[in-house]
Amino acid sequence: MKILFVAMANSIHTARWLAQISDQGWDIHLFPSIDAVSIHPDLRNITVYETFYSNQVHHHKSVKTKGFNLYSLTSVNFIKNVWARVFPDYRAEKLAHLIKNIRPDLIHSLGIQNAGYLTIEAKEKLKGDFPPWVVSNWGSDIYLFGRLENHKNQIRNVLRNSDYYSCECIRDLKLAKDFGFTGKVLSVIPNTGGFDFNLLYSLRQGGKISSRRLIMLKGYQGIFGRSLVGLRALKRCAELLRGYEIMIYSAPREVEIAAEIFSKSTGIPVNIIPQGTKHSDILRLHGRARISIGLSISDAISTSFLEAIVMGSFPIQSNTSSCDEWIEDGKTGFIVPPEDPAIIEQAIRVAIQNDDLVNKAAEINYYLAREKLDNQIIKPKVQEIYRTICADS
């Protein structure tokens, strides 16, 4: 089986999804949806097609890179920028040429805004000579961008021209159909794939959740993230947090500054987890946390939310994600508006003061996660999806 993926080569989400099929002996190819230089170190057994690349970018020895080797990373970045200005359409042309050359059994674009838009351009250039096309909806691809005028027609064009649709929440199924998708809907599976529960359990702190004295805060801030609102909510209930430590991950500079000011004004220690920290270390921290807070104005199934419930941490998650498909508000987590620090404050207060709530929630969430997120269940499902598509075609 020969599969061509159009996806971000430097994304952990791409690497996790492909890990589910990388041991099958299939012929797997990857065309980067964003012309970045890096290749994620977790990718395995795949051929990556770059226009220009450098040997200074290190990746696993099982990954083959094709393109023009300029050796110097500085030269690669410079040439790519010049090339993009002179030939703005070259990425779609290159993808169309690749499809025609390798003739994959199917194409799978991971994400609509980058991979989907690029793939539909290539399809239009090939004028109908195109293999079965799977589109995966990532995060806010439809839920947020589908409400923006300059994206509506592009999303509609992608979905009307694709044959299969994959998403990670029921909410996005209806949205895809509203945008004109008439093909076959695949199983609703998290875009991260499943979890290795034996590994995760070894990283999880023993004892009751109520004995934990750590709070995890997702540091995203910008177009989507609202971690600064989370900090304001924590400050409003600072008197309850004596003896607690706050850890912030994926934090940009403005969040680091706000965290330092928060810590000095409240006396509560706040640590910023460095960018590039090993994923297992982040999981270990969720496994020490009593509460994990994630706030954004748009998302699907937040990976950090799933990691929190697997590791026993009590989730406080924004209502703009599809977390209501996983937790019961007030019982196994709190679902909150992402921009209201007063409501988030009340959720934190309850989660800090109610030991029985967090202990019972952890038990319920863990068994739900074992049922729906175990990679021993999800991995065979994903493999069967590709086998079925090839058989259908």
Image (cartoon, rainbow, N blue to C red):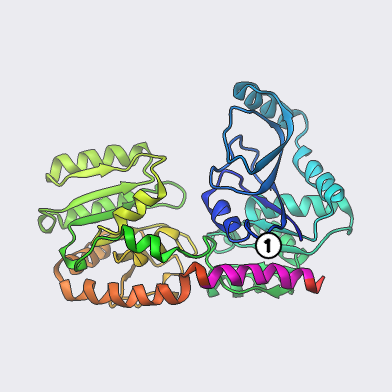
Residue 295 falls left or right of residue 62? left
Tag 1 residue: 135
Query: 78 or 277: which is nearer to us?
Result: 277
Q: Quadrant of residue 167?
A: bottom right
Q: Position of residue 55 (x, y in %)?
A: 63, 28
Q: Is residue 337 visible?
A: no
Q: Position of residue 133 (x, y in %)?
A: 75, 62
Residue type beneath disc 1: Val
Residue at 54%, 62% (x, y): give it.
191
Q: Is residue 62 above or below residue 138?
A: above
Query: 114 or 311: which is nearer to us?
Result: 311
Q: Is residue 71 visible?
A: yes
Residue 333 falls left or right of residue 45? left
Q: Classify mark 1: residues with Cα within 10 Å, few (<14), some (14-19) or many (20+).
A: many
In the image, the segment drawn in magenta is 377-390
Residue 326 falls left or right of residue 377? left
Q: Name the element at disc 1.
A: strand
Q: Does residue 286 show up magenta in the picture?
A: no
Q: Is residue 169 above or below residue 234?
A: below
Residue at 24%, 67% (x, y): give it.
347
Q: Main secondary structure of the magenta part?
A: helix
Residue 242 falls left or right of residue 11? left
**Image quarter (top left, top right, bottom left or bottom right) of the C terminus:** bottom right
